[in-house]
Amino acid sequence: MLTGEFLDTLLNLSVFAFIGFVLWLSLRKLP
Amino acid sequence: MSLSARALIWMSLGVIAAVAAWGVLDPAGMVATASEMVTQQFNSRAWFVMLTVTGMLVFCVWLAFSRYGTIRLGADTDRPEFSTISWLTMLFSAGMGVGLLFWASAEPLTHFRLMQPLLGDAEAAYQAQFVTNFHWGLHAWAIYAATALVIAYFTFRRGTPMLVGAPFTAVFGQERWAHIVAWLANFLAIVAIAIGVGGSIAMGVFQVADGIDLLAGGEGAGDLLVLIVFLALFASYIPALLVDLGDGMARLSNLAMATAGFLLVYVIVTGPTQYMMNSILEGVGAYLVEFFQRGFLTYTFFEPATTSWFQDWTLTYMVWWLAWGPFVGVFVARISRGRTIREFVAGVLIGPVAFSLVWFGTFGGIGLFEALRGSGELLALTETAVERVTFVLLDKLPLGLLTTLLTIVAAFLFIVTSVVSAAFVLGSFTLGGTPDPSVRIKLVWGVLLGFLGYAMILSGSIDAIKKVIALGAMPFVFITVLLLVCLVRALGQEGRHADR
């Protein structure tokens, strides 16, 4: 089986979400 | 005082007190839990940690060469307070301190011992030197530089309080989440600093106790000696928190740094000089060629033993530097007011790294000389009593008694000065960034740091201490990235104002 660990996936998904947040902060227009 | 300010004081004191109490009551349990959690984090997020750290190095270099490079950390009319030489000395002693004396030969030799069976003598020595330089090199200083840059820019140019969370409210102030993240950043910075300094206390106490034991002819410091050294340390820094010593602490730390410098020259002169000079040169060459690519390496395709070595050393170091970031950052920021961003980045990256390369080239070189052409005693010690390596090495050179004593004194000074400044920084952070925290809060932090240090001593080993520090620091990785976003946005605003 090539199925990954649940916790590992979760930890990495949270990193992706964080990177998304960083991109949003960096790119959006500030008032 | 606002509710969130009060929450910050009590939450941070509470969490640190709880960790300390846990470590004192059940040291084995704390280490086992920390170890398991760190392994999970490192397994899953190794790529992100290395990417962040390498990204910080790229960021610093980019910033220095960008049009923002000429912006001053302060008003446009501010000029640096210290000469460049004394600035560099202070930088270095703040960033590395006691670890330098501890790991001088011990780290390259430990890597060599692990790699030698796989790679053979020459290649293992080369890799051992490289990896040590990598751990103490540009990546470490880029972390410090970036954190200090953010703190210095916002404090001296934007006039915010000297707090890790301040950039969030300064840039995104109108938004609710910014206040929450700012609070979290302050909280996590306090936790990371306290746990990092606690670990540093334990490491320093182990080393000083072992040096004294060696002078007394013992075979390894017993629990009683460790306790006595710890109490002596505690008794030395507590009074220093009660009075305003002015720049007395800075002088002591410069004295410790001067001692380290003296030891370096002494070893080069009295040891196998040509061997160490060759070692320095080879180390510099290898470092210059490979440092960038290694910043992306996570040892995925190696056997599990190598991957776990990578976690125990490289990842742990990187997270450790991140944890020290806000503490060193506040200090570095304070001494760097009035420098331009370009000057700042060049100084912080080049000066200390050059010194590190010479330091580890020398001590690694003489350590490897002993391993390859001597008795191999030092190499064996890296497995049984790593805190003893520096002393046994000095003992093999002339006037070993004197240099051992000097090392003990320097190690002691390094810890006292870092605890005193940590109590100051933590006091200031908990009281909203005040430049003049009260004696009471400094004392509270001083005592808590002592407890935490003691808890780490009870955990019994350097490896265990490293796990606890890594766990305390891990959340801060995210905060550091966000701080850089704040800096870029603030610089962008400045550019827009200037263009108008």
Image (tube, coloured by chain):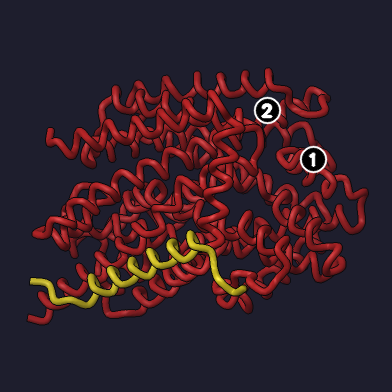
What number is the disc on residue B209?
A: 2
**Residue B83: % across, % down:** 39, 55
Question: Along the horizontal axis of the image, is A26 left or right of B312?
Answer: left
Residue B7 vertical position relative to residue B181 in the rendered view, above or below: above
Verify CB contact (< 8 Å) between mark 1 and mark 2.
Answer: no
Q: Is residue B3 left or right of residue B380?
A: left
Work out whether B142 lies above or below B204. Answer: below
Residue type of the residue flagged with mark 2? Ala
Chain A drawn colour: yellow
Image position, residue B397 (x, y; %):
82, 43
From the viewer's perspective, is B369 left or right of B16?
right
Q: Residue at x 53, y 35 (%)?
A: B415
Chain letter, disc 1 residue: B
Residue at 69% x, 68% y is B283
**Label 1 amino acid?**
Thr
User: If the image is split into quadrants, where does the N terminus of chain B sit?
Assistant: top left
Q: Nearer the viewer, residue B342 or B134?
A: B134
Residue annotated with mark 1: B384
Asked where in the image residue B295 lies, by quadrant, the reply is: bottom right
- Other-residue count near label 1 (Cα within 10 Å), few / some / many at <14 / 14–19 / ≥20: few
Q: Position of residue B11 (x, y in %)?
A: 29, 34
Q: Is residue B473 above or below residue B126?
A: above
Please name whichever residue, B1 or B71, is drawn nearer the observer in this view of the structure: B1
Mark 2 surroundings within 10 Å by alpha-carbon count, few (fewer than 14), some (14 through 19), many (20 or more): many
Give percent across and percent down for residue B169. Answer: 16, 55
Q: Which chain is red?
A: B
